[in-house]
Amino acid sequence: MSKTYLVTGANRGLGLEFARQLSARGDRVLATARDPDSATELKPYAERIDALDVTDATSVEALGEALASETIDVLINNGGVFPGQHKVEEMDFDALADAFAVNSIGPMRVVKALLGSVRRSGPGAIPGVGRIVNISTQMGSIARADGGAYAYRSSKAALNMLTKLLGQELRDEGIICVALHPGWVKTRMGGEKAPLTPEESIAGMLRVIDGLRPEQTGAFLDYKGETLPW
Ligand SMILES: NC(=O)c1ccc[n+]([C@@H]2O[C@H](COP(=O)([O-])OP(=O)(O)OC[C@H]3O[C@@H](n4cnc5c(N)ncnc54)[C@H](OP(=O)(O)O)[C@@H]3O)[C@@H](O)[C@H]2O)c1
């Protein structure tokens, strides 16, 4: 049965490929982009494209209102930024704050605004419904932190914590929340040296999302379904 997916930052990169593969398999895509008018590649794959900047409370609230009567089976918090900050003496605190605003606080704003629509999907015990997927990264693993990228790593570690807590809070409602690492993928963020194509990463992540079980809520998984260390 066709399901409804909300994908943030769907105008390019992994978000665009989520939209493409979901629409190709007959699912309904509600997409967001900071500038919907320029999201030309996305248009064929999305039923609607709403404007969303996850750092802007008014923008997130407007999305919540626009989608208030929708049912969202799977909410994919995909939009993110990678500020390259590798030395403490080079720290740009505005960029550090922006990383937290986009990568950690933004997804929580979106969850809060759209939770009513996700709840309408029904309990996660029924395969395919009631899921919140926060696109994280293995670079947010504290166990694997081997230096550099302060802003990106710390903001995604915060996202992991928020995901774990959401999983606990929403567990009894049957909503499954996970943090998902896409692998290192050729996108504007991942760069040309990345070993994975968006097609491979998204195919893997969709397999993982489709197969999520209620007991996995709060987990930190990669695109192959392997559990990552916090
Ligand atoms: N590629 C990788 O190797 C890799 C690895 C691990 C994790 N990830 C994660 O995967 C997700 C997608 O990354 P990607 O590789 O597809 O990167 P990308 O090509 O740089 O795309 C990033 C997307 O996020 C959107 N975005 C940025 N700031 C936003 C904001 N304030 N509000 C809403 N959307 C915003 C961008 O919109 P604009 O076009 O308007 O800027 C764009 O659609 C990110 O969360 C990233 O951290 C990627």
Image (spheres, rainbow, N blue to C red):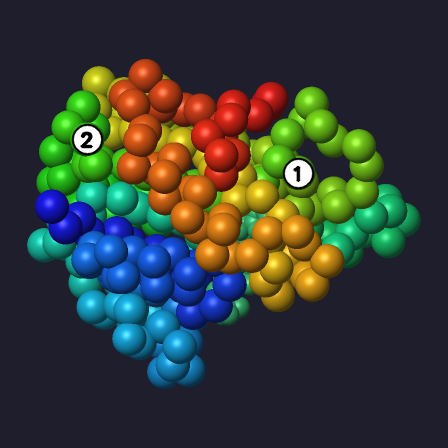
Res 59 quadrant in image:
bottom left
* Dot placed on the residue nearer the N-terminal end, 2 or 1: 2
* Foreground disc of the pair 2, 1: 2
Which percent across, then down, holds residue 100? 58, 47
Residue occupying image coordinates x 42% and y 64%: 16
Residue 212 seen in render: yes
User: Mark 1 highlights which residue?
Assistant: 139
**Looking at the rendering, which quadrant does residue 166 occupy?**
top left
Q: Is residue 228 above or below residue 28?
A: above
Residue depicted at 19% across the width and 63% down the height = 66
Tell me the CA gap for discs 2 and 1.
Answer: 30 Å
What's the residue at 18%, 23% (across, down)?
125
Residue assigned mark 2: 127
Mark 2 Cα-neighbour bin, 10 Å: few <14, some 14–19, many ≥20 = few
Q: Percent position (x, y) of residue 158?
A: 56, 34
For the residue labelled by badge 2, is the local secondary structure a helix, a strand or a loop? loop
